[in-house]
Image: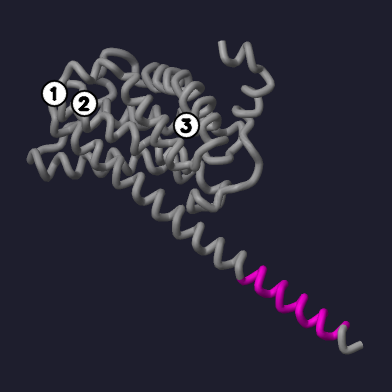
Amino acid sequence: MVALLWRARTRALFTGPAGGGARSGVHKGARGPLLLATAPLIIAACVAAYGIVCGDARFTRPGALDHPFALIVVAQFIGACGEEIGWRCLLQPLLRTRFGPIASSVVVGALWGVWHVQVFARDPRYAGSFLLAAVAMSVVLGLALDRTGPSRLPLAGGFHALINLGLLLFMDEESGAVAPMALFGAACLVAALVWTGAGEARARAWNRTRNRALDGRRIRSGIRTRTETRS
C-alpha cells in the first residue's frame, strides 16, 4: 500500500542515499561481505557456547531434514527477502531520514521482534532473549547497510537467511528451550557491539582527518592573507 501511494518516495528509499559510511566502521564496498560473514560467526559463537554450557553440540544433517536442503535454502532466502523489503528496505531508510543509524536500527529491531508475536507464548526469558537478538541483529544490519544502494535487499535477505539456516542446522531454539535462545541473543549482542565499536572508531578517525584538513586550510589561508597584506 505504501509503495503504491508514494511510489517516488519508495523508489528513493530502496535506492538509498549516496555517500556516507563513516559511522559503519568500514568502507561501504566492504560492508556487504563483512555483513554476510557476520552471520556464520554468530552461529559459530552460539555453537561453541552451547557446547561449553550444555556439554554437547547439536548438528542436523541436511539430508535428515524433511525437505531437500536446496529447496530449504531457496525458500529461506525468498522468505527472508520478503521480510526485509519491509524492515531494512522501507522502514529503516524511512526512520534514517530523522534518526541516526543506531537509534533507527533499535526501533526497527524492536518492532521486528514484537512482530514475531508467537515467541510471547513461551517462557519470558525466551521471549526476552529473542527480542535482544532481534534488536542486536537490526543494529548490525542497520550499520552495515547504512546509505547503501540497491544491494540492500539481497544483503539483508542473505544475512537473514544465513542466520535462519544456521539455527536450523546447529541449534534447537525452536523447541522453546531457553539456553539456545539466550546464547543466540548474547552472540548477536556481541556482534552488534563489535560493529558499533568499529563504527565509532572509524568516525573518530574520519573526524580527526577532517579536522586536520580544515586546520591546514586555515593555516594556508592565514599565510595568504598575511602575504597579501604585506604586498
Dot 2 falls on a residue whose secondary structure is: helix
Residue 44 in the image, given as x and y percentages of width and height: 27, 42
Residue to which mark 2 is pinned: 127
Mark 2 vs 1: CB contact within 8 A: yes
Residue 127 in the image, given as x and y percentages of width and height: 21, 26
Residue in view at x 49 percent, y 58 percent? 202
The disc placed on residue 123 is 1
Q: Is residue 148 magenta?
A: no
Report the front residue among 116 and 216: 216
Query: What range of the chain is rendered magenta?
Result: 212-228
Other-residue count near label 1 (Cα within 10 Å), few / some / many at <14 / 14–19 / ≥20: few
Amino acid type at mark 3 = Ala
Amino acid type at mark 1 = Asp
Residue to which mark 3 is pinned: 156
Q: Quadrant of the N terminus?
A: top right
Other-residue count near label 3 (Cα within 10 Å), few / some / many at <14 / 14–19 / ≥20: many
Task: Give me the C-alpha separation between circle 1 and circle 3.
Answer: 29 Å
- Image vertical order of residue 86 relative to residue 25, above or below: above
Residue in view at x 23 percent, y 20 percent? 119
Q: Magenta span: helix, strand or loop, mainly? A: helix
Task: Give me the C-alpha separation between circle 2 and circle 3.
Answer: 23 Å
Residue in view at x 24 percent, y 36 percent? 184
